[in-house]
Image (spheres, grey):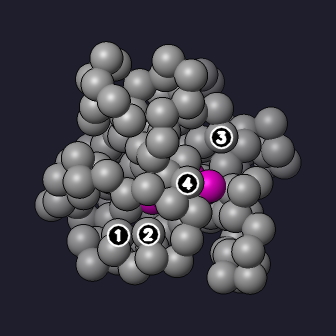
Amino acid sequence: MKRIGLLSDTHGLLRPEALDFLAGSDHIVHGGDIGGPDILERLARIAPLTVVRGNNDTAAWALALPETARLDVEGVAVYAIHDLKALALDPVEAGVRVLVSGHSHRPSCVERDGVLYVNPGSAGRRRFSLPIAAAELLVDAGRVEARIVTLVAQGASG
């Protein structure tokens, strides 16, 4: 079984709770709005990393980052894009099983037409009353499960 840690929208803040949650991941996918190269360096110390550039990743360090990325884990195709509205492919036709996005800061996990759409939410600064969250994919022999985890309680500061 492989564990893929998912996070997005750190906006320059990599919380200790996020690092603790990601510990033990076999791979990490960051769905964009990273906020700085130091975030990527710290994540890469935990596990191999796949990242996409978010709409706020406009500094020189981020220009080489792709807008989309594909990762194959034990026969499961995982596709990452920051803003789902910018999706230019049909995930079913492309053989994608899991589509990871960010942008909205709203954690969600829904399956449509055999594709699991996962937005891990924001692991960085709190936006409005949305939770601080991350997610994980558990991939085993071609099967996949997703789980979203609240990292910081709703009423806590952050």
- The reply to whether residue 142 is visible in this rendering is no
Q: Earlier in the sequence, mark 2 or mark 3?
A: 2
- In the displayed structure, would residue 156 be above or below residue 143? above
Rounded to the nearest whole Å, what is the CA distance between mark 3 and mark 1?
Answer: 19 Å
SS of the residue at dot 1?
Answer: helix
Label 3, on which residue? Answer: 103
Label 1, on which residue? Answer: 43
Rounded to the nearest whole Å, what is the CA distance between mark 2 and mark 3?
Answer: 17 Å
> Could you tell me the amino acid type at mark 4?
His
Apparent side of residue 157 relative to residue 103 in the rendered image (left or right)? left
Rounded to the nearest whole Å, what is the CA distance between mark 3 and mark 4?
Answer: 11 Å
The nearer-to-camera label among 1 and 2 is 2
The nearer-to-camera label among 3 and 4 is 4
Apparent side of residue 76 relative to residue 21 in the rendered image (left or right)? right
Is there a contact, CB below 8 Å, between mark 1 and mark 2? yes
Residue 107, x across and y down, in percent: 48, 27
Is there a contact, CB below 8 Å, between mark 2 and mark 3? no
Name the residue located 52 percent from the left edge and 77 percent from the top edge: 37
Apparent side of residue 26 relative to residue 84 in the rendered image (left or right)? left
> Could you tell me the amino acid type at mark 3?
His
Region rendered in magenta: 29-33
Of the numbered discs in the image, which one, if any, rests on residue 83?
Answer: none
